[in-house]
Image (cartoon, rainbow, N blue to C red):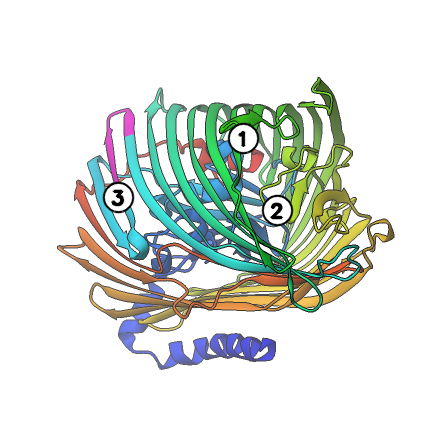
């Protein structure tokens, strides 16, 4: 499969010069009209690739297969990125990735990346920035940065759009946006609504190899349906105070309600496949989350060309609450039917979180080809989470508090950073050297009841202070080619959930808990990249090496009374080495494509204290998106992806693949658009793994999908005048504000 994919990719690029040479004069005129900028762009109907000095930018407004979906659906179509069934995102296999929205940390869903991606509709996104080896201007946290840039108005006068979408499984989307630009002010606003009906089904089969009781097998199945209603609104103004100063103010609002129903069947069996205990559990969840945010950006240009000062202040707050009921019925014990006695647990969770971001950045040009960047950033985050549980008493007919599960978790997280970055071009070489100093402090207090009923407080503290250098050496070559060698030192801080020691018991056979003794990960990355830019094609490739010391992994313990615990632990080291190729090209007037392949090897140190041996292996993944211009106003898109099997510590992941398609028709003088999209056409994306240890074998699989097919209509109205000269909004400035997040 890998050889076939590579052969197809190389064949496609080898065909480009021949097809262009044989093309008609009309095709040649079209190709010659494509403009080549400092950030080279290949214009197409799919994710348009732009290659910048230290990032890859994908313009995704023409990604047809994502229309009607969420940000998670869209990011799954971007080269280098993968999104799993729970909305967790990975970059080249690394899961410790910083995800930003307009260059800022979001508090949607309490800051959960999965909920953030589900809450943002794909239609609201303009482009995606991917930074695989960030410079000193970026936060030192994580193994890469993904920045989601939302759409803003750009035309004179007033203009806007209305969108409506309907999909299978009663999924609906709707939205409206309006922009007004005149004089010194640019006003914009938008609103979207999503009704997302998500179905999920899967299994977990466990074999206990050293079972101390009669249970040898545990078979669990867990179909579920989740309905989310999501409202999101944004409004703001850009005001030009003078020809050198601009003030931008933006307000954000998001509200989500969740209604989830899950039905678990758990069959515990002997080695002879006879029942020891058979049970059903019905889990219902009703919850809500709301978040607010305000950003204020002030940009000043000095008289000296390219000298700039930018100030940013952002405040956001969010709150949420969920009410869960776990209703368990045991109907068979040791092969004998018993009268089901309901075992009902009520679980109420709530929380609030607040985030403050203060940032100042200064850029000073030095000579004809030098530049000095300096800045300061402080981010403060606080959160309060509470959990209250009660069990149903069959004798009294009422609920009694279960103090063994009740807990309160308060966190304060602060990161203060200063950076200095110097860039100098000497002939064909460009040297960039930067140093970032960060002082991080995480403080938390866990309150829970001990067996005697006394409320106990447990403090936790984790300091992460360090210096993080970043070095880049770029060499320009002839014929629009360049190579770059880079090194960065970064940090991977544990999340509050990874530190919280209180167990999550929602899975009756596997509890999940954090570890307050975790240390931060120490990350070293080296990358060698090559880029070849043509009038209608881009090829970018990279060799990369990442070493993570004190790597944080989730380790499953040996079973006790048929229950295992998954806990966060520091392991010695993980090494990821690979080669990646990304290509985007317009082959002819009617056909363009974007393709990506990533081949990598993993080496994980063993952890004998947890019964884990050292593992290593090679895997790969790839995808290709084809864009077809079929007729005037009519276009189509076909996409395929494949992920090979791989081994990560205890888990052996199974291969998975899928196919997506979309078609678009523009009419009414390009004011109206109708898009049909279909995802996972053959229902083949079924992620799963086999976990192997001395104590058990665990086979897991889950399939999750929302709207498999959708139809979306968009109507655009208003003026279409040219854009006046203006200072860019901070998140639009390449190499400036976004790079500092």
Which mark, by number, is residue 650?
Answer: none
Element assignment for label 3? strand
- Mark 3, Cα crowd under 10 Å, few <14 / some 14-19 / many 20+, is many
Residue 185 belongs to magenta span: yes
Residue 276 image position (x, y, % from top left): 66, 57
Residue 71 image position (x, y, % from top left): 42, 47
Q: Earlier in the sequence, mark 3 or mark 2?
A: 3
From what the image shows, is residue 216 above or below residue 130? below
Circles 1 and 2: CB distance less than 8 Å?
Answer: no
Residue 240 image position (x, y, % from top left): 34, 23
Q: Residue at x 37, y 56 (%)?
A: 66
Residue 343 belongs to magenta span: no
Which mark, by number, is residue 174?
Answer: 3
- Magenta span: 174-187
- Mark 2, Cα crowd under 10 Å, few <14 / some 14-19 / many 20+, is some
Residue 403 image position (x, y, % from top left): 64, 25
Which mark, by number, is residue 508?
Answer: 2
The quadrant the N terminus occupies is bottom right
């Amino acid at each position: 499969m890998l050889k076939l994919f590579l052969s197809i990719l190389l064949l496609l690029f080898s065909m480009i010069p021949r097809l262009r040479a044989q093309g008609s004069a009309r095709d040649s005129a079209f190709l010659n009209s494509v403009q080549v900028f400092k950030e080279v762009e290949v214009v197409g109907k799919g994710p348009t690739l732009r290659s910048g000095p230290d990032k890859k930018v994908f313009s995704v407004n023409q990604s047809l297969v994502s229309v009607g979906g969420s940000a998670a659906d869209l990011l799954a179509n971007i080269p280098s990125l993968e999104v799993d069934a729970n909305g967790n995102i990975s970059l080249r296999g690394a899961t410790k990735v910083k995800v930003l929205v307009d260059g800022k940390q979001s508090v949607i869903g309490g800051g959960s990346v999965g909920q953030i991606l589900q809450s943002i509709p794909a239609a609201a996104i303009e482009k995606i920035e991917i930074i695989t080896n960030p410079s000193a201007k970026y936060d030192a946290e994580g193994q890469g940065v993904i920045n989601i840039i939302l759409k803003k108005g750009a035309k004179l006068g007033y203009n806007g759009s209305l969108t409506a979408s309907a999909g299978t499984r009663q999924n609906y989307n709707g939205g409206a946006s309006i922009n007004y630009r005149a004089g010194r002010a640019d006003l914009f606003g938008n609103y979207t609504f999503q009704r997302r009906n998500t179905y999920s089904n899967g299994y977990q089969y466990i074999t206990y190899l050293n079972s101390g009781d009669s249970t040898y097998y545990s078979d669990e199945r867990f179909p579920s349906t989740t309905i989310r209603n999501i409202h999101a609104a944004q409004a703001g103004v850009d005001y030009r105070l003078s020809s050198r100063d601009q003030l931008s103010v933006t307000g954000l609002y998001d509200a989500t309600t969740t209604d989830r129903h899950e039905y678990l069947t758990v069959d515990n069996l002997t080695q002879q496949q006879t029942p020891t205990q058979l049970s059903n559990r019905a889990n219902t969840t009703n919850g809500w989350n709301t978040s607010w945010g305000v950003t204020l950006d002030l940009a000043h240009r000095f008289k000296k060309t390219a000298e700039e000062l930018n100030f940013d202040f952002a405040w956001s707050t969010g709150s949420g609450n969920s009410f869960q009921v776990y209703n368990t019925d045991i109907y068979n014990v040791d092969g004998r039917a018993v009268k089901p006695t309901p075992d009902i647990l009520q679980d109420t969770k709530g929380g609030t979180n607040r985030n403050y971001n203060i940032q100042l950045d200064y850029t000073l040009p030095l000579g004809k080809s030098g530049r000095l960047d300096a800045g300061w950033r402080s981010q403060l985050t606080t959160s309060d989470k509470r959990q209250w549980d009660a069990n149903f008493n069959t004798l009294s007919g009422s609920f009694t508090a279960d103090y063994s599960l009740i807990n309160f978790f308060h966190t304060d997280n602060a990161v203060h950073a200063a950076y200095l970055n110097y860039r100098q071009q000497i002939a064909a070489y460009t040297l960039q050297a930067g140093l970032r100093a960060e002082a991080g402090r995480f403080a938390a207090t866990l309150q829970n009841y001990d067996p005697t009923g006394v409320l106990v407080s447990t403090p936790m503290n984790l300091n992460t202070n360090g210096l993080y250098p970043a070095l880049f050496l770029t060499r320009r070559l002839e014929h629009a080619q360049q190579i770059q060698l880079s090194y960065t030192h970064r940090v991977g801080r544990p999340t509050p959930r990874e530190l919280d020691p209180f167990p999550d018991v929602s899975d009756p056979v596997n509890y999940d808990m954090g570890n307050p003794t975790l240390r931060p990960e120490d990350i070293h990355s080296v990358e060698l990249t090559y880029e070849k830019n043509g009038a209608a094609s881009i090829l970018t490739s990279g060799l990369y090496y990442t070493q993570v010391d004190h790597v944080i992994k989730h380790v499953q313990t040996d079973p006790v009374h048929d229950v295992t615990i998954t806990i966060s632990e520091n392991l010695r080291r993980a090494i990821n080495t690979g080669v990646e190729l990304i290509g985007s090209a317009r082959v002819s007037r009617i056909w363009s494509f974007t393709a990506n392949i990533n081949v990598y090897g993993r080496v994980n140190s063993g952890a004998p204290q947890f019964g884990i041996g050292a593992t290593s292996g090679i895997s790969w993944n790839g995808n290709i998106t084809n864009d077809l211009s079929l007729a005037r106003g009519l276009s189509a898109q076909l996409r395929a992806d494949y992920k090979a099997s791989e081994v990560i510590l205890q888990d052996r992941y199974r291969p998975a693949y899928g196919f997506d398609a979309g078609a678009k028709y523009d009419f009414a003088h390009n004011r109206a658009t109708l898009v049909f999209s279909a995802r996972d056409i053959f229902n083949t994306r079924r992620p799963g793994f086999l976990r192997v240890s001395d104590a058990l074998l665990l086979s897991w699989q889950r399939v999750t999908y929302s709207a498999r097919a959708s139809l979306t209509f968009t109507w655009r109205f208003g003026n279409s005048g040219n854009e006046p000269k203006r200072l860019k909004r901070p998140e639009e400035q390449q190499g400036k504000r976004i790079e500092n997040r």
